Amino acid sequence: MKFKRLVVGLAAIAAVVASSIAQAQQYPDKPITLIVPWSAGGSTDQTARVLAKAAEAYLGQPIIVVNRPGASTTIGMGELAKAKPDGYTIGTLSSTAYLVSLQGRQLPFDPIQDFSYISYYGDNLIGIAVLQDSPYKKLSDLLDFAKANPGKLKFGTAGVGTTQHLTIEALQRDSKAKFVHVPQQGSAASAPALLGSHVDFIMETSVWAPFIESKQMRLLAVSAVQRSEVYPDVPTFTELGFKSLRSVQAIIAPKDLPEPIRAKLENAFRKALTDKAFQDTMKKLAMQIVDLPGAEVKKLVEGEYALAKELIESTKK
Amino acid sequence: MIDSLQQIVYGLSLATLPQNLMYAFIGCLLGTLVGVLPGLGPITTIAVLLPLTFQAGDQLGAIIMLASIYYGAMYGGSTTSILLRVPGEAASVITCIDGYEMAKQGRAGPALSIAAIGSFFAGTVAVVALSFVGPAFAKFAVSFGPPEYFALAVFGLVLSATIGGGSPARGLCMVLLGLLFGLVGIDTITGVERFTMGVPAITDGIDLVPLLMGLFGIGEILYNLEQKGGLSTLTSKIGRFLPNREEWKESAGAIARGSGLGFLVGLIPGGGAIIGSLLSYTVEKKLSKTPEKFGHGAIAGVAGPEAANNAAASSSFVPLLTLGLPGNAVTTVLFAGLLIQNVQPGPLMLVKHPDIFWGVIASMYVGNVMLLILNLPLVGLWVQLLRVPTWILGPAVLLIAIFGSYSLRNNWSDVGLLMVAGGAGYLLRKAALDAGPFAMAFILANILDTSLRQSF
């Protein structure tokens, strides 16, 4: 009797293990959905579409991109968090997704712990731009003036609590300079604000790029892991001794995604980084390609979250 | 001047290539169609087509098509506004006020014709202005800072209380309500949610399209279903298709002024077609010798705003192409379309992609002619719609509106919003409260609030 039960038990275990292995081996046997929590046409949408296209080759199944925009990514992220962790629903992660939870908003999911991390793909290049004829040639010029004249300089960003805004908060805290924040309605609105001299400088994603080329604006510093290939003369905040936040672009899935499936996806998405069309799109949007394994993405995101939290608390003092 | 002429001729030589003519025609047709269908607007259409243009081998052709969808929608948008009081496109909401009244009086034909003709005139004037002074106007666009926006919003708000022709006190109440609802969502300045009651669907604010469709369209359908015999008896008189001499006289000035106003408003980022048509309507009402007619079927109240929204749609290409600044939601999607085609809009566009710049502008001349030819004969067909019994037309419009609302963000909550707004629209109609001032205040609330606080 006992023996029989043992056999049945073992057989059951074996069956479960075998089926999950088989599941992972078969995976993927149907199309995969990639949730982009932004509208079609934005930088995340554009880059994720080409990356997904490239990853299809390594997965053997089509990846269907669906846009679920709204509420600063929380609508799309909420949907992803609730999806079945079977590898058929994955999504993109942008720093906005965890930064919103620091704005005192109640989210129906945990922006970090409720997800599995597949891979990283890049950083938005964020930088301080001033008008070409402005007297500030280096970041230190700007800081010196602001220290001597606290509250005289106005800066524009895409909005309160964005990576752009918090990086300036870090700069103010560490340099003791004082600026006035004029939040704009999204990145696109920042460039005209600077062009019309309604603000003295902007801290923004690559909206300044065409104006740098036409010599109407100048970049003083960028927040990037290393100097940008496109702007090799512009120093990074890190080089200048200031902290900056990353503008994360990663591929994630709901939490508890089985490891074999996660590994398969990681492999496909990291290999896709070498795709020519993807690299061209990233360059066009002045974004830097960064390759990181899934486990490190989570650590990076947790670190960024902690730093952002610290910065927001310091602004409240 | 000679230079510009040469450029236009160059652009026309590109725009009249058979394949580009075809792209422009497809765009105009699609634009008219989504303009006519309530809820489906140019934003969704262009966004849906974006991934397809990835594959299109023809850079210029793809961009011409996307652009013509935008201004094509401005033509089509007036149709259901006039016939059914359902704004086919957000910018046509003003046209509902007098256009629908005209239809009720059996003057749907002249209203539709004047909307098409006004659109054609304004579109053409705006393109001419664009080709000759466009790039120079880019400076004007960025000089518009928060204080100027605030002034514009206050101006619009003051005028909007009396927009429907009802009692000013009732109008004012609706304005205040509109402001309140317009402020729902995340506050730009502090990043804090306001009046959202924890509902994620409205953290970005209440979406304009389902709100307008509900308040005007669904509300009106419900109201009509309740009337004996429904809408068709109200508007069974079809009458002439073309405006008579008196109507021409009333509209000519309105079209000219609407074109100018719309052009200027379209230039400033954040302006856009809807504010252009609001300003035009109120200006016409102030200038009119018979302001009491407004709200009761004044043709100038159709001609002016329709001209203005077309001119604004065309002139919003100036900040888009020469500065790389998308001024409104539609041009934001167009901006992405240009990037996908490897064209970086911005100050160097004229130098690096003169073919695209002049090709697109020249295609707008061609597109406007196409749209006029397409739309005028359709007037006869559209007017026949009024013969369709309400019990068929009502549900059909409702279905399209539901489809359109869902397509905005692929989200059922927008359909829910449509229903709630529809119920509210019906109640307002019953209480003889005008939704026009509400809609205007709702649109202006965000500009008013943000620009005031950015100015400090």
Image (spheres, rainbow, N blue to C red):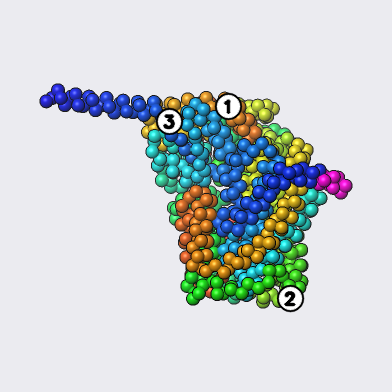
User: Image check: B395 left or right of A182?
Assistant: left
Above or below A264: residue B307: below
User: In the rendered image, which residue does mark 1 sit on?
Assistant: A275
Q: Give the range drawn in magenta.
A: B1-9
User: What residue appears at the point 66 percent right and 73 percent down from the top-left corner?
Assistant: B239
User: Image check: A149 left or right of B209?
Assistant: right
Q: Residues within 10 Å of mark 3 (few under 14, many from 20)?
A: some
Residue A213 occupies quadrant: top right
Badge 2: chain ID: B
User: What residue appears at the point 40 percent right and 40 percent down from the top-left corner?
Assistant: A83
Asked if residue A95 can be seen in this view, the reply is no
Residue A27 occupies quadrant: top left
**SS for tag 1?**
loop
Q: Which amino acid does label 2 sit on?
A: Lys
User: Image check: B6 left or right of A38?
Assistant: right
Give x and y (percent) for residue A178. 62, 42
Between marks 1 and 3 in the image, the one whose residue lies nearer the viewer: 3
Q: Return the residue nearer the eye: A171 or A285.
A: A285
Magenta stretch containing residue B242, yes or no? Answer: no
Give x and y (percent) for residue A23. 36, 29
**SS for tag 3?**
loop
Q: Return the residue nearer the eye: B139 or A4.
A: A4
Badge 1: chain ID: A
User: In the rendered image, which residue does mark 3 sit on?
Assistant: A28
Cα–Cα span, label 2 and label 1: 67 Å
Above or below B26: residue B382: below
Q: Which amino acid does label 3 sit on?
A: Pro
Give x and y (percent) for residue B56. 64, 38
Q: Which amino acid does label 1 sit on?
A: Asp
Cα–Cα span, label 3 and label 2: 72 Å
